[in-house]
Structures are given as structure tokens and as C-alpha cells.
Image: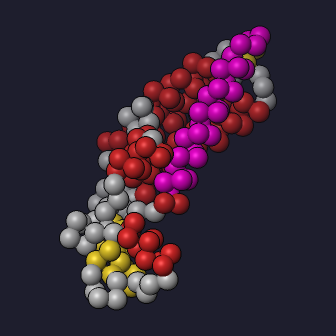
Amino acid sequence: VCHETYKNQEGKWLSPEEYELAKQKGEKVEIGSPESMSKSKKNTIDPENIINKYGADSVRFFILSDSPPERDIQWSEEGMLSSYKFIQKFWNLSENIIEISKTEQKENSEEIEIFTNQIINKVNQALEKFRYNVIIATFHEIYSFFRKISEKNINYKNLKKNFEKTLIIMSPVIP
């Protein structure tokens, strides 16, 4: 995981918190290129603070979504916020589908069956290849598909069951 580095006028490394304080005081700070996080360069982020602010699921989601495992991850607060918002949107979608499932059931939707089976296959293939960023992209597909279905406000007999299947395949990333 990479993060920008910061140096003050004396050439001493500054932590992100020290950088913010120096910036508020109007001090000149050199912003270096992103490098692997290390204590010696003081470019680390306290995971406890991030988890307290966004939750462990958002942190995990962000780290896995950013890049393939063989590449460095560029840390960004914006990326964390985006991951947090996506998980909140998914939670709201879940609540919406629960409400829809309380209404009178209609016939099965073949579209839902086909989509769910294709998504399960896609996630399995990505897992086998350790392509977690592909899995995260698939989660966005799942959200878009079920949001579109939920907007119809129809309780298909297979809606809740198939949505639950997608939640199960998401559980290794977002328990």
C-alpha cells in the first residue's frame, strides 16, 4: 500500500497528520511521490482510525478494489469514502429488497436466474485467478442489476433467493 511522503523545510519526514498541521500553519512542505508505507518515512495511515471512521468492510473493499494483487495500491481518502458509500448503497438496496419480498409474489424471473448463475460463475473464475479487483467490479454489476429489478417493485418468486445467493458470494469480501 502506497501513500504520498511529506518533508518539511529541514528535510525531516512528516506524517500525514503533521503535514495537515504544517499546512494549516502555512509552513512550506514538500510533497513526495507515493511510496510503500513505512514508519521511517512516516507515510503510514493508522488502520484503527480508518476502521473506526469507515468500518472494516469498507477498508477491505477499498484495498481489494484498487488493483490486482501484483500491483501497489495507492491509498486515497476519496477511494475509502467511495467504498464506504457503495457499501451503504448496497445496504439500502438490501433493505429495499426485503420490503419488496413482503408483497404478493409473482412468477419467477428467468432474467434473475440467468444473471445470478452468470455472476456466480464470474466470481468463481476470478477467485481462482486471485483477481479480487474483478470481483469488486462484479459487485458493482450485482448492485446495478438488482437496483434495476427493485425499481420495478415486483416480488418475483426467485428475487429474494437469488439476491441472497449474491450476498453469500460477496461475504468473503464484505462479511
Q: Residue at x 45, y 27 (%)?
A: 168
Can you say which quadrant of the picture contains the C terminus? top left
In this picture the colour scheme is secondary structure
Q: Main secondary structure of the magenta part?
A: helix
Residue 145 in the image: state x and y as whole percent: 65, 38
Which residue corresponds to the image point at 65% horizontal and 20% vertical from the top-left?
Answer: 98
Q: Residue at x 35, y 41 (%)?
A: 127
Frontmost residue, 164 versus 22? 22
Q: Residue at x 40, y 84 (%)?
A: 29
Viewer-proximal residue, 112 or 79? 79
Q: Is residue 70 visible?
A: yes
- The reply, left or right, for residue 3 in relation to residue 85 is left
Residue 120 sits above or below residue 38 on the image:
above
- Image coords of residue 56 (percent x, y): 40, 41
Q: Position of residue 99 (x, y in %)?
A: 70, 20
Residue 91 colored magenta?
yes
Q: From the viewer's perspective, is 113 left or right of 11? A: right
Q: Which residues are magenta?
A: 79-105
Image quarter of residue 34: bottom left
Looking at the image, how many numbered discs can be counted on the residues? 0
Residue 144: percent from left, percent from top: 65, 42
Residue 100 position by quadrant: top right
